[in-house]
Amino acid sequence: MAAPEIRHMKWWGWGDEDVSFSDADKPKLWPYLQRELGLPDDIRTPPVSFEEIELPEAKTNEPFTNALKVALGEDQLAADKNTRLVHAAGKAFRDLFRLRRGQVDFAPDLVVFPANEDDVVAIVKAAHEHNAVLIPFGGGSNIAGCLEPQDREGRFIVSLDMCRMCRVLEVNQRALTASIQPGVYGPHMEEQLEEHGVTLGHFPDSFMHSTLGGWVATRSAGMQSDKYGKIEDMVIGLRMVTPSGTLVTRTVPKASNGIDVRHLCIGSEGILGVITEVTVQVHRLPEKKVFEGWIFPDFESGVQAIHDCVRLGCLPVITRLNDPKKTALSAAFKKTQTGFKEKIGNIVKWYLGNIKKIDFEKCCMMITACEGDYDTFHMQRRESAHLFRKRGGVCLGESPGKSFQEAKFDFPHVRDYLMDRGVMGDVSETSVTWDKLLPFYEQTLAAIEKAIEQTGSKPWAGCHISHNYHTGASLYFTFGCLQCEGRELEQYLYIKRAAEDAFMAGGGTLSHHHAVGTEHLPWVEADISKTGVKAVVALKDGLDPRSVMNPGKIIPGAEPLREWGLTEEAIARFNKAD
Ligand code: FAD
């Protein structure tokens, strides 16, 4: 199979340049948003044009670039405006807000495209010898500020785009493992695996535009994690090139060989080295798979139903439970329905309201997927359905499941639609144990809503659960509001901080799967303890003594709020508001 042409995402938003989100077939969406967020009719805040963007002047580091010119081909280096811009940020709200305003304070001075591990070794060696900063780049989809090309010492910055390393190298049918290069994008990787009749089973919402290396480096989770695990459960072995040499782990199902260095690389966000090969466990493609929709009377009954399935070992591969706010939002996304479909929709609504006594203000939608061979599929579907019904769940059949499947990779475009209309929309996610989950949910929602109100805007905040464990689950909060003109970033950071503070106060973690980057630096010490940070620093110093690998991420400095991008005045205003 020929390698696909690499198309980087649009610099100002999500997805390919020629793909955008339209509300033309979703008549309820804009009225819903206007009502919920108190939006004026005519608000439009489009991004500046490419021509209006001025990049910071590229720095030079001749000894480094000369070393690269010897080791690599000319077509592996680029420093044109578009390439530098595309590699200047990820897709965090803060990244996009600044880019759309034409505020590009940092951009890599050079972008390099290694084709194999030898190239990576040469680049890392040159960076170490000539004091250039290297930032590994996968799909650029992270939302934690993991790619910010800023160096406190003002050094030459190189983005290391892994997209040419995109092959599935080997599939072992007996062991069910696959060795894969890290720069492969989700769809291209699954296409290659499908030729061998297997799947990795990792489908984050960003699947279309993110890479295996990025998933491993951010410790990502996909929507089918309840069956296949998160990326850290899938990685059996890997290779990582560091300034101190190449770290290689064996392909074995389990080892008791001291501290697990494989896990030191997973989640390392490019600060230790460049992952050049990953061996993962793969699975035979399922014979049967069905998506369905369920409606629960309220969030608590949906949570209890999931918990019952966890306890009895019959959890579907996907259980995505929306709270009332997210249920209402997904209803607003519904496409126009006419004729027979419209009639059926009305009958279902009447049945739910009048026979099942569902209160549409409180009810919660859950999307499920069951899969497996004939027996596993039927057993999982039958047993989970039984438990769902016991908690008041009503099955809506396959139609909502089909809509979810069609829309699941389109949904990420919505943020651009909102940003075009003066709206801040973002997410913060965490995980918490079952005993704390419901009060934690209430307290966090209240904290986010209060913070938005304090900024003078009407709050919208909702939550969904989509990754479940023996001991607890993840909670994924989505929030939005009309932006305060002139203080948009400060407003955003204020709200984000309220969410993260609530996570810490309630016994959660700073992120379940979105990584630390720069966005979550202020909460690292509270999350992993002072000594935990010391351990990470020691690891960084040991493997990367000159700190050339993606500095400024994961390890907090002395003033994390300032590193987060807040000015003195904003910090003072923050403290006053508290
Ligand atoms: P990048 O963003 O390019 O890089 C992320 C980090 O990994 C950086 O620190 C980079 O230096 C490092 N890195 C990349 N490649 C390598 C390598 N080969 N070696 C060493 N370090 C490397 N995340 C989820 O987990 N689940 C989701 O469902 C999900 N949905 C999302 C939906 C949207 C709309 C958006 C915008 C993001 C979503 N994310 C999700 C976040 C994001 O997609 C993940 O963090 C993803 O893992 C990043 O992969 P990437 O290839 O884009 O990496």
Image (tube, rainbow, N blue to C red):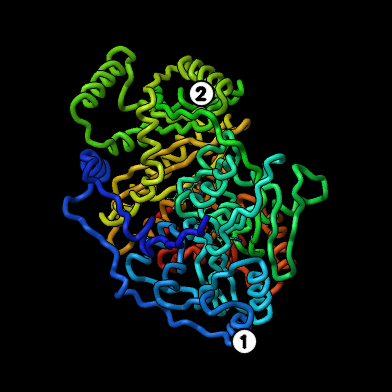
Q: Amino acid at mark 2?
A: Gln
| Classed neighbour count for the residue bearing mark 2: other residues with Cα under 10 Å, few (<14), some (14–19), many (≥20) | some
Looking at the image, the residue that sits furthest to the left is 42
Left-right relation of 244 to 572: right
Observer-nearest of 26 and 146: 26
Q: Is residue 253 above or below residue 43?
A: above
Question: Are the residues flagged by discs 2 and 1 in contact, CB closer than 8 Å?
Answer: no
Say which residue appears at 69% left-offset and 67% top-offset. 242
Quadrant of the image occupied by residue 160: bottom right
**What is the residue that sits farthest to the top in this orientation?**
355
Q: Can the viewer see residue 505 in this picture?
A: no
Q: Residue furthest front?
A: 1
In the depicted view, which residue is nearer to us: 398 or 285? Answer: 285
Q: Nearer the viewer, residue 375 or 392?
A: 375
Q: Is residue 265 visible?
A: yes
Q: CA distance from mark 2 to mark 1?
A: 61 Å
**Residue sitting nearer the eye, 526 or 463:** 463
Q: Position of residue 536 (x, y in %)?
A: 69, 59
How packed mark 1 is, by other alpha carbons closer than 10 Å (few <14, some 14-19, many 20 or more), is: some
Q: List x then y, in percent, for residue 551.
A: 59, 68
Q: Is residue 556 left or right of residue 453?
A: right
Tell me where residue 574 sits by quadrant. bottom left
Q: Which residue is mark 2?
A: 304
Type of residue at label 1?
Pro
Q: Is mark 1 within 8 Å of ligand 1?
A: no
Above-or-below relation of 235 to 538: above
Q: Secondary structure at mark 1?
A: helix
Across and down, in percent, residue 325 comes to 35, 35
Q: Which mark is residue 63?
A: 1
Q: Earlier in the sequence, mark 2 or mark 1?
A: 1
